Image: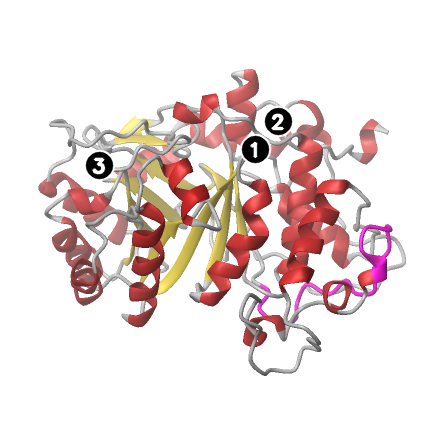
Amino acid sequence: MSTHAPGATPKAAPYRQLHFDRGARPFLVLWELTRACDLACIHCRAESRSWRDPDELSTAEVTKVLDDLAALGAPRPIVVLTGGDPFKRPDLADIVSYGTKLSLRMAVSPSGTPLATRRNLAELRLAGATAVSFSIDGASAESHDSFRRVPGSFDLTVNACREAVDLGFHLQVNTTVTSETVDQLPGILRLVSSIPAGLWSLFFLIPTGRGRLLAPLSAEQIEDVLLFLAEISEIMPVKSTEAPQFRRILVQREAEYDMVPSTPLYSKLMKAVEDMLPSGTSGHGGDSGSAGIPNSISAGIPGRIRSDKGNLGDGRSSSNSVHGGHTRRPLVVGDGYGVVFISHTGEVLPSGFLPMVAGNVRDSSIVTIYRESELLNLLRLPSGYGGRCGICEYRDICGGSRAQAFAVYGDPLAEDPNCPFRPAQSA
């Protein structure tokens, strides 16, 4: 598949491919150690509660799975311990330490609660965790706490983020994108860049769990948000979750397609970022204004944000580079294809947002399940996808969100309903 328009000068792909078979070993293992959590977030896929499930995997069962993952040899998977809130498990540091001694890369994704203290974070750092992620879903205490449904969560989360950076963690900030949060994105960007986080990960709402009660964006609005992310990726490293069409957008921009829409949402988001930049920003260091994005971040801002104010929203652009500044090229991985999820009771799923069980680590090795599951192997064959995804020229680098397809159509192989792109074969 060509990733460039006819006549375009070939350039390095704006995405990354793994240098091993994604069907033989996972790149990323997301592990829901517990569903216990002291928050009550309105979007929670796990519908968490404050108490632990007595059927959770024991410490011994967890370490057995870590042994299996480590036996894969290099390159070993990244293991992200999540929940619920993994701090609700008293053996969390022991689990991190055990995985670290096996040469697994251990990361933790706690909740913004009173448990997210410097002392607890420092214990994880000492145990060998190298990365931590927290969720921020509003640019202010009012908006974030309303989403998380616990007063004080915003302040606790921001403080924990700053403590994590100070302790030497690589910090990822997660944000759920819904109709309720999309207007908050520019303000969250400013906050994330000021902490500063190493990566901003945007999760596009899957209508599952409590998230069924929220209003998702339309396919066209999601496209606008992804185009916005492509622009601000030169200010802040970003990634998308359950919106793999972000890779298609980056390829199209690199191929010099006209990708700047004149739609109200895109223009609104871009204008908000532009307004936050320090007065007179020219991309050359200096201190930021009191309410602006730090100039150390905005130094890499693309010309269409920094100086081409007249071009915003008119369908034209002055720059299409996605390789400068802080750009982070996304990996070509997907649910069950490089990524796998383990539930608190040992069920293995393609992702936490795709509730189809491929096996259970209490019954079989995680490696065996990952390699031999009929479900996971079907998800790894883009040629078998239905609708537009199956005939799309970008299917091998995008493939659509299998979780989005399942949530809407009940079929994980159906087309992604949240992508408006029309493949050439369907024209």
x and y percentages locating residue 35 in the rendered image? 24, 33
The residues tagged by marks 3 and 2 sit, at their Cα atoms, a distance apart of 33 Å
Local SS, label 2: loop
Give the CA distance from mark 2 to mark 1.
7 Å
Q: CA distance from mark 3 to mark 1?
A: 31 Å
Relative to 293, 152 lies left or right: left
Image position, residue 66 (x, y; %): 21, 48
Judging by the rendered image, the residue that carries numbered circle 1 is 381
Quadrant location of the C terminus? top right
Q: Is residue 31 magenta?
A: no
In this view, the residue in front, 213 or 131, is 213
Which residue in the protein does label 3 denote?
34
Q: Position of residue 86 (x, y in %)?
A: 22, 44
Residue at 63% x, 71% y: name it: 278
Specify few, some or many for label 2: CA neighbours under 10 Å numbering under 14, 14-19, or 20 or more: many
Examine the rendering and report whether any part of residue 77 can be seen: no
Type of amino acid at the residue the image marks with label 1 = Leu
Report whether 246 appears left or right of 321.
left
Q: Is residue 213 left or right of residue 367?
A: right
Determine the main secondary structure of the stretch shown in magenta. loop
Q: Residue at image x 61%, y 37%?
A: 399
Residue for badge 2? 385
Q: Are marks 2 and 1 in contact (CB under 8 Å)?
A: yes
- Judged from this view, the residue extending furthest toward the right is 7
